[in-house]
């Protein structure tokens, strides 16, 4: 797991539980999206992977009518982070944050 439900709720400043199931689904989708896009599996020790998931979950949550597609505001951020995670953490280094 890269980010927890509590971390996402804190990021989104949500203090109610009505959307916990939706947020859990979005977290899972963001983590799978990251793995599919980079070919790497990351864990919570990689801050850039955490930021990617938080930004993507927030974008999907706040723009639910467009789920599965990043909005124009976040598209460049998402692409930049994906590029870094793809090319900077592809090796077998212990410092990669990839497992």
Image (spheres, rainbow, N blue to C red):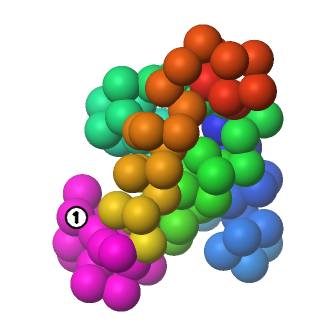
17, 36: nearer the viewer: 36
Location of residue 36 (image quadrant)? top left
Confirm whether residue 94 shows in the render.
yes
Residue 56: % across, % down: 45, 62
Quarter occupied by the N terminus:
top right
Query: Disc 1 marks which residue?
Result: 69
Q: Residue at x 42, y 39 (%)?
A: 86
| Magenta-colored stretch includes residue 68 | yes
Q: Which residues are magenta?
A: 59-76
Q: Is residue 36 above or below residue 33?
A: above
Residue 37: % across, % down: 30, 38
Q: Residues within 10 Å of mark 1 (few under 14, many from 20)?
A: some
Q: Is residue 39 above or below residue 23?
A: above
Confirm whether residue 64 shows in the render.
no
Q: Residue at x 53, y 67 (%)?
A: 55
Give the side of residue 4 with respect to residue 90, left or right.
right
| Magenta-colored stretch includes residue 73 | yes
Give the side of residue 6 with respect to residue 41, left or right.
right
Total number of numbered labels?
1
Location of residue 79 (image quadrant)? bottom left
Location of residue 46 (image quadrant)? top right
Residue 75: % across, % down: 31, 73
- Look at the numbered disc 1 and give the secondary structure of its residue: loop
Quarter occupied by the C terminus:
top right
Residue 2: % across, % down: 65, 37
56, 84: nearer the viewer: 84
């Amino acid at each position: 797991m890269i980010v927890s439900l509590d971390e996402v709720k804190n990021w989104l400043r949500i203090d109610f539980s009505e959307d916990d199931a939706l947020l859990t689904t979005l977290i899972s989708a963001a983590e799978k999206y990251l793995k599919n896009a980079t070919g790497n599996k990351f864990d919570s020790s990689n801050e850039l992977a955490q930021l990617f998931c938080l930004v993507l979950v927030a974008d999907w949550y706040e723009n639910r009518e467009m789920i599965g597609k990043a909005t124009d505001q976040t598209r460049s951020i998402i692409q930049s982070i994906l590029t870094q995670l793809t090319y900077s953490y592809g090796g077998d280094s212990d410092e990669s944050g990839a497992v």
